[in-house]
Image (tube, rainbow, N blue to C red):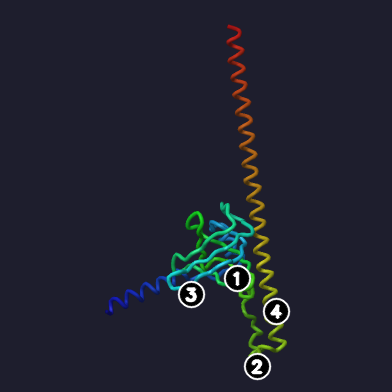
Amino acid sequence: MKVTLLLIGILLYLNCNACRCPKEERDSTVHKAILNSDLIFTGELISCEYDDPFVKAYQFKINELFKGDYQHDIINGCITGMCSEIPKEPGLWIVYASQINDSTIEINNCSPTISLTRTNILIPPASIFPEFKDQTSDSLKVKIYKLERKIDGLNYWLSDLEKLRKYKKEHSIIIETRNENRQIYLIAFLALMNLVLLTIVFIKKRK
């Protein structure tokens, strides 16, 4: 019995440490997520099943795709372990995901995935917050403080969106350049083949 409890304790400890997110500046977290994510998009959470102990799934309608190859408007999500995140807030999200298969993603809880309705969590509580400990939640000071956090968080959200659109634009330029190079190579190859054929025909006529 003691051995079993010890093993359970070790497993829980390892899982907790495996899911411990490094403390970094958001710019650094977003930069790493852009490089390491399979799919990145803005999307609307249209369904979520997390109350059922046997069903942990969700579904997004994709509005704008920044990274990845996905041809449909709707994508499903699921949990694959203790480090998976279940998005719950309805509305618009920026999602950084790993692709499980052709139609399913997984979101790691250490990713900078964020809902537009929760942008205030991007701003750490200010050091002046203790001033409000004697204030009621309906006081003007507290309302202004909360509003300022929401505005600052929204600016972070928009900044993330701008980074993703810049990445998408740069990536599209790279793809277009590659396609143009392929077309040039193809034209050059066809021209060379025609030249070879004309040379062969000319030689045969001379014979």
Q: Which residue is mark 2?
A: 134
| Label of residue 191 in the image | none
The amino acid type, in three-letter code, at marker 3 is Asp
The numbered mark at residue 51 is 3
SS at badge 1: loop
Q: Which residue is the site of mark 1?
A: 90
Residue positioned most to the bottom: 134
What is the CA distance from the residue labelled 4 to the residue labelled 1?
A: 20 Å
55 in relation to 131, above or below:
above
Task: Residue at 54% x, 64% y: name it.
Answer: 59
Comes first in the chain, label 4 or label 3: 3
Mark nearest the camera among 4 and 1 is 1
Residue 150 on image: x %, y %: 67, 75
Mark 3 surroundings: few (<14), some (14-19) or many (≥20) residues within 10 A: few
What residue is pinned by disc 4?
A: 147
Characterize the local packing of mark 2: few (<14), some (14-19) or many (20 or more) Cα atoms within 10 angstroms. few
